[in-house]
Image (spheres, rainbow, N blue to C red):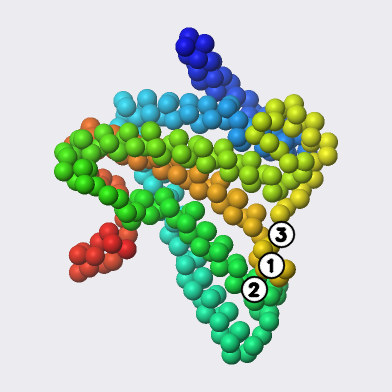
Amino acid sequence: MMDSIVWLFQNLLMAFYNLGYAVTHPGLWLDWTDKQAIMRFIYYGGSVQFFFVVFTIFVVVTIVGLFRNQFMWGCVRVMEGIANTIGRFVAWAGLIMVLQQFIIVFVQRIFAASEISMGFGTVLTKDISWWAEGLKFHNALIVALCATYTFVQGGHVRVDLVYSAISHRAKRVIDMLGCLVFMMPVAVLTWMYGWYFMWRHLVVPKPSASDTLERLLTKSRALRWNVETIGFSPNGFNAYFLFKILLVFYAGLVFMQAISFFYRSYLEWKEGEASTGKYLDRDTLGAGEEAYEGTH
């Protein structure tokens, strides 16, 4: 037990040094002309050191926010703003997906064509099956990058048989516990799985979560890019590595939203029911459509 406590505090203290060292020596992990720098980036992106840097920043920001609530509200507004901005932009992929499906059906059924060309200047010509399977990517964009936007907008389905019957402060306690016990751990596990899953489809030799830094630096001698371009059919969509990248972005956004919602729940618990929805930027359907708010 004592060893675990010592290990925890050692990592928390070392987080300040690790962050400072990384910021002051960017060439060691951002110079991607150096194979060893790439391997350092891969290693530290899924490492204990990186976790404790993020965790320590969260702890420090939280402590400051406990004494300066307006600072914490500022953090909430920034993080919710990021989720809203990304979500509102990526949501247009839904329209692109519908238009692309319409073009596929129209070209295939009316003109009986086997290929579709799209683009201005540089034209992308692919088999119809490539465009058809590519619809999955638009759907993945919406699922991965609009999840936190939907959360901010209150669009996720929730069963609140107990939640709806309890007091305002009890609701906020449940929300805070949900962030700490469910959202953050699941986001961290998804990141840890997704990080190495992504890189194993981008480079060879394939990195492993069990590899030490020294082992990865040794592997860097044979490092080369080997981006996955295998499709499920001969002429089908062959950029499935993008789905692995989206998984990592999804985990990062969910973790950020967990922090944001934890802060919001704490502030609404502390300031009372009057602060519910404070600074919350939700989409509106316009004047006269209030009855439909929150259902989109």
Question: Residue drawn 43% across and 59% down?
Answer: 88
Instruction: For marks 3 and 1, give the one nearer the viewer.
Output: 1
Q: As drawn, is 35 to the left or to the right of 104?
A: right
In depth, the one of 4 and 70 nearer the eye is 4
**Amino acid found under the numbered disc labelled 2:** Ser
Residue 266 image label: none
For label 1, the SS is loop
**Amino acid found under the numbered disc labelled 3:** Ile
Neighbour tally class for label 3: few under 14, some 14-19, many 20 plus, Cα within 10 Å: some
Q: Position of residue 25 (x, y in %)?
A: 67, 29
Of all residues, the one furthest to the right in this rendering is 221
For label 2, the SS is helix
Question: Do residues under tags 2 and 1 come within 8 Å of each other at their CB atoms?
Answer: yes
Of all residues, the one furthest to the bottom in this rendering is 110
Question: Residue drawn 42% across and 26% down?
Answer: 59
Residue 272 found in image quarter: top left
Residue linked to disc 2: 129
Neighbour tally class for label 2: few under 14, some 14-19, many 20 plus, Cα within 10 Å: some
Residue linked to disc 3: 230
Q: For the residues marked 3 and 1, what is the alpha-carbon distance in whole angstroms?
A: 8 Å
In depth, the one of 45 and 200 nearer the eye is 200
Instruction: For marks 2 and 1, give the one nearer the viewer.
Output: 1
